[in-house]
Image (cartoon, grey):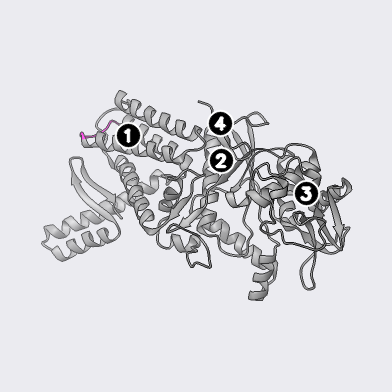
C-alpha cells in the first residue's frame, strides 16, 4: 500500500511522491523562544517527530529542518520584564526546549537554524522581492504586496482575496498600501536590537524568516511543510506568496497541519487559566505516558486534554509495559525457532500498523496494533512459556513498531537491571519471612507497591509488573 497524506492545499488524500526520489525535505515551523513550551507545542512536535520516524521506517532519507525565532516582540518584552539581554532570554528558552522535547523522545532535527544567524540571507531575500516589485519600502519598513501574488492567495485557507482579514501578527498600518500587506522588514524602535540594511536599522518580519531559512537549507521546493492549524493563515499563506515570488517555483508539495489541544473541552488559553507547560505536565505524568496520550489520537484531530484522559493513557501504557517486560523476564522453554503462531501474530500486527500509518499517519491504528501484539504475547506466556525464538521475535516487534511511535525504547539492559533489583529485594523479603521478620518483609512489599511495582509468583517463577 502506498503512503497517502492529507494535503491542506488540496483538502484531499494524496499519494506521497517526494521530489527528490528517496530523499524527503521536511520543514516544520519552530517556536518563538520567549517562554517554556506548553502542551500544544508537545502535540505538534511529537506529531511531526512521529511522521519523520515513519518516513525513515519506510526507507526514506529525511532531511528535517526546524527553526527558532529568536528575535521577536515577545522576546523583547520578556527581556524588558526580566532585565536580561534578549539574546540571553532566547538562549535560555532554546535550551529549555531541547530539554523538554528530549524528555518526550522528540529527536533533534538535522538543522535548527536561528533567525539571528541568518540576517544577511534574509536581507538578500527582501531586497530581491523589492527589486521584483513584490515588495515596497515605507519609511524604513518593507511590506509585501499581497495583490502582486493574487493567483496564489488562499491556497491553504481557501479564502478569496477580498474576504481575507488582517490576521495574527499582521497589524493595520497607515504606511501600508493595503491592510492585508505584511511586513518583511521592520524598522527598529529606540532601544530595540537591529541590523543594518538598505532600508536602515531594523529586523526581520515573522514570515520571511521561515521562507529564507527553509529554502537556504532545503532548496526552493520542500516536500513537506508542517505546523499547527493556527499557522495556516496568515503565516503559511504568507510564506507561499513571498517564497514563490522570490524563486518562481512551487514552495511546498505537501502541507500537513496538526489539530489543536483543548483543555477540558475549552480552548487552551492563559487568560482562561487552563494553560499548561510541558514541565508542569511531566511533573505529574511520565514522559512515555504523555507521548502515548498524544499519539493515540490522529495528528489532524483535536485532542481534549484532561487528567482523566491522561490517567487512561497511564493505564494503557502500563499494559504495554507489563506485556513487554513480562517477555523480558520469561524463561525460555525451547530453542531459537519462531513458532508459526507467533510469526503470524507479528505479521498481522505489522500489517495493521503499516496500513494505519500509510493512511495519513493514523497513529491511533498503529497504537492498536501494539496492543494486538501485547494481547498475543500475554496469552502465549499464560500457556506456559515461549521459545527463545518466540521471545526475541516478539521483543523485536515491540521495539520495531514502538520505535516509530517513540515508545518502548529503553535498552534491554536497563530493563534487566530493574528486574535484577526487584528480584534482589524479593529475595531479601523472602529471607525476612523465613526468619519470621514479617515487619521487614511487609515493608519491602509495601514500598515496592507504593513505587508501582507488583511482585507475583507465577508458573515460571517470580514476575513483576508496573502498576500505576
User: Circle 2 sits in a helix, a strand or a loop, which is it?
Assistant: helix
The residue wearing badge 3 is 146
Tag 3 and tag 4, C-beta contact below 8 Å: no
The residue wearing badge 4 is 59
Tag 4 and tag 1, C-beta contact below 8 Å: no
Q: The magenta stretch spans which residues?
A: 383-387
For disc 4, the neighbor class at 10 Å (few under 14, some 14 to 19, many from 20) is few
User: Circle 3 sits in a helix, a strand or a loop, which is it?
Assistant: helix
Above or below residue 367? Residue 417 is below
Tell me the number on the disc at residue 52: 2
Q: Distance between the residues labelled 3 and 2?
A: 33 Å
Marked residue nearer the N-terminal end (4 or 1) = 4
Above or below residue 390? Residue 65 is below
For marks 3 and 2, give the one nearer the viewer.
3
The answer, for residue 101, to whether it is visible in the render is: no
Marked residue nearer the N-terminal end (2 or 1) = 2
Is 263 positioned to the left or the right of 463 in the image? right
Viewer-closest of 189 and 94: 189
Question: Residue 300, percent across and down?
Answer: 52, 44
Q: Which residue is drawn at 31% across and 39% down?
A: 327
Question: Residue 427, percent across and down?
Answer: 21, 54
Marked residue nearer the N-terminal end (3 or 4) = 4
For marks 2 and 1, give the one nearer the viewer.
2
Q: Characterize the magenta stretch by its predominant secondary structure.
A: loop
Marked residue nearer the N-terminal end (3 or 2) = 2
Q: Is residue 305 magenta?
A: no
Q: Which residue is drawn at 52% across and 54% down?
A: 42
- Quarter-wise, where is residue 192 in the image? bottom right
The residue wearing badge 1 is 391
Marked residue nearer the N-terminal end (4 or 2) = 2
Amino acid at each position: 500500500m502506498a503512503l497517502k497524506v492529507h494535503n491542506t492545499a488540496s483538502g484531499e488524500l494524496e499519494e506521497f511522491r517526494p521530489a527528490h526520489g528517496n530523499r524527503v525535505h521536511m520543514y516544520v515551523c519552530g517556536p518563538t523562544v520567549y517562554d517554556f513550551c506548553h502542551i500544544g507545542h508537545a502535540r505538534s512536535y511529537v506529531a511531526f517527530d512521529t511522521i519523520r520516524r515513519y518516513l525513515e521506517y519506510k526507507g526514506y532519507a529525511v532531511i528535517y529542518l526546524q527553526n527558532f525565532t529568536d528575535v521577536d516582540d515577545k522576546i523583547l518584552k520578556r527581556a524588558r520584564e526580566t532585565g536580561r539581554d534578549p539574546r540571553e532570554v532566547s538562549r535560555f528558552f532554546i535550551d529549555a526546549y531541547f530539554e523538554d522535547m528530549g524528555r518526550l523522545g522528540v529527536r533533534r532535527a538535522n538543522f535548527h537554524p536561528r533567525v539571528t544567524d541568518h540576517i544577511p540571507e534574509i536581507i538578500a531575500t527582501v531586497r530581491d522581492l523589492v527589486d521584483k516589485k513584490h515588495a515596497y519600502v515605507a519609511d524604513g519598513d518593507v511590506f509585501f504586496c499581497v495583490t502582486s501574488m493574487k493567483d496564489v492567495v488562499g491556497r491553504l485557507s481557501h479564502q478569496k482575496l477580498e474576504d481575507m482579514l488582517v490576521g495574527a501578527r499582521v497589524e493595520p498600518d497607515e504606511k501600508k498600501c493595503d491592510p492585508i500587506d505584511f511586513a518583511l522588514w521592520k524598522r527598529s524602535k529606540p532601544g530595540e536590537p537591529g541590523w543594518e540594511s538598505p532600508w536602515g536599522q531594523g529586523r526581520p518580519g515573522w514570515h520571511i524568516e521561515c521562507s529564507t531559512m527553509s529554502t537556504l537549507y532545503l532548496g526552493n521546493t520542500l516536500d513537506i511543510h508542517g505546523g499547527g492549524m493556527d499557522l495556516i493563515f496568515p503565516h503559511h499563506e504568507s510564506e507561499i506568496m513571498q517564497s514563490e515570488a522570490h524563486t518562481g517555483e512551487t514552495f511546498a508539495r505537501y502541507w500537513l497541519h496538526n489539530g489543536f489541544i483543548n483543555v477540558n473541552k475549552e480552548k487552551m488559553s492563559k487568560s482562561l487559566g487552563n494553560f499548561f507547560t510541558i514541565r508542569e505536565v511531566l511533573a505529574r505524568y511520565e514522559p512515555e505516558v504523555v507521548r502515548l496520550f498524544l499519539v493515540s489520537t490522529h495528528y489532524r484531530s483535536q485532542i481534549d486534554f484532561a487528567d482523566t484522559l491522561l490517567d487512561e493513557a497511564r493505564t494503557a501504557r502500563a499494559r504495554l509495559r507489563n506485556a513487554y517486560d513480562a517477555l523480558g523476564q520469561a524463561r525460555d522453554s525451547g530453542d531459537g525457532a519462531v513458532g508459526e503462531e507467533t510469526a503470524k501474530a507479528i505479521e498481522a500486527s505489522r500489517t495493521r500498523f503499516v496500513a494505519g500509518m500509510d493512511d495519513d499517519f493514523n497513529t491511533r491504528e498503529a497504537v492498536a496494533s501494539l496492543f494486538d501484539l501485547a494481547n498475543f504475547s500475554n496469552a502465549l506466556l499464560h500457556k506456559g512459556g515461549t521459545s527463545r525464538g518466540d521471545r526475541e521475535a516478539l521483543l523485536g516487534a515491540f521495539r520495531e513498531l514502538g520505535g516509530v511511535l517513540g515508545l518502548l525504547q529503553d535498552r534491554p539492559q536497563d530493563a534487566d537491571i530493574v528486574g535484577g533489583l526487584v528480584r534482589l529485594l524479593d529475595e531479601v523479603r523472602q529471607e525476612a519471612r523465613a526468619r519470621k521478620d514479617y515487619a521487614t518483609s511487609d515493608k519491602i512489599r509495601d514500598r515496592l507497591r507504593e513505587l508501582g511495582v507488583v511482585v507475583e509468583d507465577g508458573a515460571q517463577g517470580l514476575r513483576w509488573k508496573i502498576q500505576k
